Every structure is written in structure tokens, then in C-alpha cells.
Amino acid sequence: MSKIQTLQNALETVLGAKVKRLVADRGELTLTVGAADYLEVARTLRDAPELRFEQLIDLCGVDYSTYGDGRYEGPRFCVVVHLLSITHNWRLRLKVFCPDDDLPMVPSVHEIWNSANWFEREAFDLFGIVFEGHLDLRRILTDYGFIGHPFRKDFPLSGHVEMRYDAEQRRVIYQPVTIEPREITPRIIREENYGGLH
């Protein structure tokens, strides 16, 4: 039995009905759980002797609003966690979808894996995902007073404000964006013998 199959069997046995979806692809397993079960599943993944995922390697947000050319129907925001079991030499991708698109929220796992702290702050800052129970949920990459969440698919490429140094006021000032949006069309080469291909 392969290592992936062994892990898959262990996950199904230990988690049971909490497994919404379990997919093996390209030698990796992705486990999807419901938001209501997320915290309990995370604790079980860390503590169950059959699993022992001691380390959270990465946590990020995903905006599915334009996934599949707009044909995607389901929750918009997802939290993706990458876990490592040093004991068993296993890796696992854990996904949980936020049930409310208007206020995306899932429980924080920073008390289970303290490495989640800044990753959750980053997902909050860039996607607007709220991690309930996080002790210091504030922006980490954008400026103070920044409006919006820049990794959301509906955030404008040019942003909402721009900053410049004002010599008269002798300080940096913020003002509405003055850049005109433009569409960039890629250059297409239509020569028959381009690059030596016949």
C-alpha cells in the first residue's frame, strides 16, 4: 500500500463524517472540511497518533469568484492550510470554505499551530477573511488606513488611492487614483518562419 493510500485510510478512519471531500492528485492529498468542523478537525490532525501533523507550513486565502471562467457555483472564499507530519513524513492540504461571502469567517487555528498567527493576518489583510478567536487580527502588509483587500478578484488593478510626496506640505499625501485604466494587448507575431520553425 502506498504512503498516500495509508494516509487516506487513516484520515477516513479518524475523521469519519467530518471529511467533506478527500482528493488524491499528483501524489498529494487535499482534505476539505466544513467551517463548523474546522477547529476540531485541526486539533485532531495534530493530536491523533495515527496522523500527528505537528507543523503548519503555510496558510493562505483563495478567492474563487472567477474560478472556471465564472461558472463556479459555491462559496467564494477558502482558507488553504499546508500541514506536515514529521512523525509519519506525510504532507496534507486542508481546505475550508467560508460559509458567508459577505463576511468570510472561519475559526483561527493559531492556538493549535502558533505558526498560523502571521499567515492568518496576511489572509485577513489581503482577502478580508476574518479568523475568529485570533488575538491580534490586524493588517500586516498594507498601509495604515488602507481601504479594501488587494487580493480579492474584484479589487481594481490600480487600487483606490495613490500616494506622492508633496514638496509644499513636506510630507507624503494620499489622493484618489489619477491613472487611467488601460487594456494591454499582447503582441502577436504572425511570421511563418519565426524562430526557425517551418
Image (spheres, helix red, strand yellow):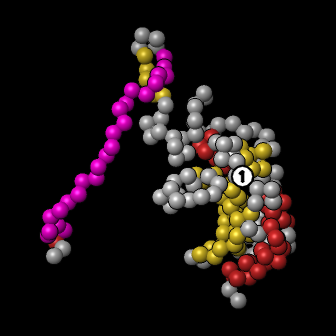
User: Do we see residue 181 in this rendering?
Assistant: yes
Decide whether the magenta segment is chiefly helix, strand or loop.
loop
* Picture quadrant where residue 180 is located: top left
Residue 116 appears left or right of 185: right
- 185 in relation to 178, above or below: below
User: Do we see residue 121 in this rendering?
Assistant: no
- 13 in relation to 179, above or below: below
Q: Amino acid at mark 1?
A: Pro
Identify the residue position indicated by label 1 in the image. Answer: 99
Helix or strand or loop: what does disc 1 sit on? loop
Q: Please say whether residue 183 is one of the residues in the magenta stretch.
A: yes
* Picture quadrant where residue 194 is located: bottom left
Residue at image coords 66%, 42%: 102
Closer to the camera in the image, 184 or 92: 184
Residue 51 appears left or right of 145: right
How far across and down, in percent of the image, does residue 39 sit? 81, 56
How far across and down, in percent of the image, does residue 107 sit? 78, 50
- Residue lying at the far bottom of the rendered structure: 1
Q: Please say whether residue 11 is one of the residues in the magenta stretch.
A: no
- Image quadrant where one finds the C terminus: bottom left
- Residue lying at the far top of the rendered structure: 168
Residues drawn in magenta: 171-195
